[in-house]
Image (tube, grey):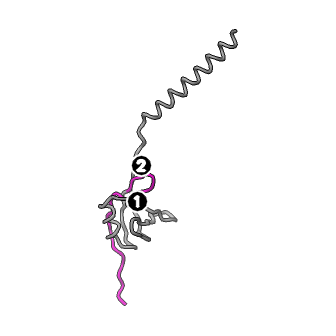
Amino acid sequence: MLPQKLVAALVIGGVVMIVATAVGQEKKAPEERKGAVVGRAVAKGGFWIEVQADGEEMPRKYYCGSDQVALKAVKTTEVGSRLRLEWRFQEVFRVVRIEVFKAPNREKK
């Protein structure tokens, strides 16, 4: 009889711990990841821009989504520009703001 009560107590205790952990995790709001990168624009498309950050080997793609301010910033930024891009992560890296330090050189031939 004692082993059955012990097993029942362990099972009930385990279920209570699982439920308490699940409830505690649901209440936590996901952390908003955000930051900034300084580098050079290497490519761009309709709703995205690729920036190669200083010290990085590979460029990263940043998307605008439906944010009209970010979309305008991407459309007006020229490939080859030196810039600072503020981003936030929401499923993908998203453009928040672009500050152009130096436009690309225009050589006359």
Which residue is at 66% across, 17% downward?
7
Disc ID at residue 37:
1
Is residue 95 on the magenta stretch? Answer: yes
Which residue is at 51% across, 29% downward?
21
- x then y, percent, for residue 108: 35, 88
Is residue 62 on the magenta stretch? Answer: no
Q: Is residue 97 above or below residue 21?
A: below
- Quickly name the residue at label 2: 33
Q: Is residue 101 left or right of residue 22?
A: left
Which of the 4 quarters of the picture holds residue 2?
top right
**Prevailing secondary structure class for the magenta stretch in the rendered image:** strand
Which residue is at 39% across, 62% downward?
38
Query: The residue tagged with tag 1: helix, strand or loop?
Result: strand
- x then y, percent, for residue 100: 32, 67
Q: Nearer the viewer, residue 10 or 85?
A: 10
In the picture as drawn, the residue positioned furthest to the top comes out as: 1
Q: Amino acid at mark 2?
A: Arg
Q: Is residue 73 above or below residue 32?
A: below
Q: Which residues are magenta?
A: 87-109
